[in-house]
Amino acid sequence: MDRIKTGTDGLDNLIGGGVPAGSSVLVTGTCGTGKSILSLQYIYKGALLGEPGLYVTFEESLERLVAHGKQFGWDIQALVDKKLMEIYTVEIEDMSEILKITKDKIDAMGAKRLAVDSLTTMMEHGIIYRSKVSKEMDKMFAKSSGFDFPPDTAGITRKDVYHIVKQINKMGTTSFLISEVAEKSNYLSRDTISEFAVDGVILLEVNTVGGSPERLLSVKKMRGTPLDLRMSIMEFTQKGIVLRE
């Protein structure tokens, strides 16, 4: 099985040498656990290996991500100039169009890696693909009863999440999909569905018990891979994130 290096020292050892090529991996955790930096590092380190990567963001600009990278000595702009890395800042609300633009960019640059920041933002801003069935039912209800088909029905949400992940998987990249989870949640994503739709789940946490806070990483799922389920401590160094036991 071909495996893609994560770019984080120590993480590949937990998943048999890397992420199985073509997989979608949910990078999830509460606010401030390092999800975006871990995913940006995945794209940046891949570009250094000659594997082009696309970073899709709903909140950050190229300039801000370049600035974030500089704190770790990453020259993101240089890799963007070499067409080994691209930042796509989403400014539209049509999910079908966002998926199309993402696929076009992947094809144009020959991207091997993809990071999406984030699936949670799609949900909370209502920027989510509406399937043809949902649209037709919406029209039917509008004509027959005068009120809209409920946009937040659990079945519709599940269908849409699975559709988005399926479309991303078809793009031919190995993908990191960021999701935020609520404090003390029993689920691994805010929508409670994404963890079942993806191939792998990496959970980031903050441990504040018995001393100074520590960021922790554990792999909860990775299809086709024997897992090391131990928690590892995440360290933010001058060169990026590294793991230690």
Image: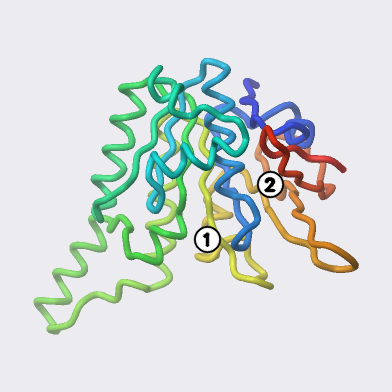
**Pointer 1: what residue?**
193
Amino acid type, mark 2: Lys
- Return the x and y of residue 88 as percentages of the image width and height: 35, 39
Q: Using the image as rendered, state which of residue 229 and residue 118 is in the foreground.
A: 118
From the viewer's perspective, is residue 141 above or below residue 225?
A: below
Q: Which residue is drawn at 60% across and 69% down?
A: 182
Q: Which disc, if any, is residue 221?
A: 2
Amino acid type, mark 1: Ile
From the viewer's perspective, is residue 1 above or below residue 239?
A: above
Q: Using the image as rendered, state which of residue 71 and residue 90 is in the foreground.
A: 71
Q: What element carries label 2?
A: strand
Q: Using the image as rendered, state which of residue 128 and residue 132 is in the foreground.
A: 128
What is the number of callouts on the image? 2
Q: Which residue is drawn at 62% across and 35% down?
A: 72
- Return the x and y of residue 108 as percentages of the image width and height: 30, 22
Q: In which quarter of the image is residue 104?
A: top left
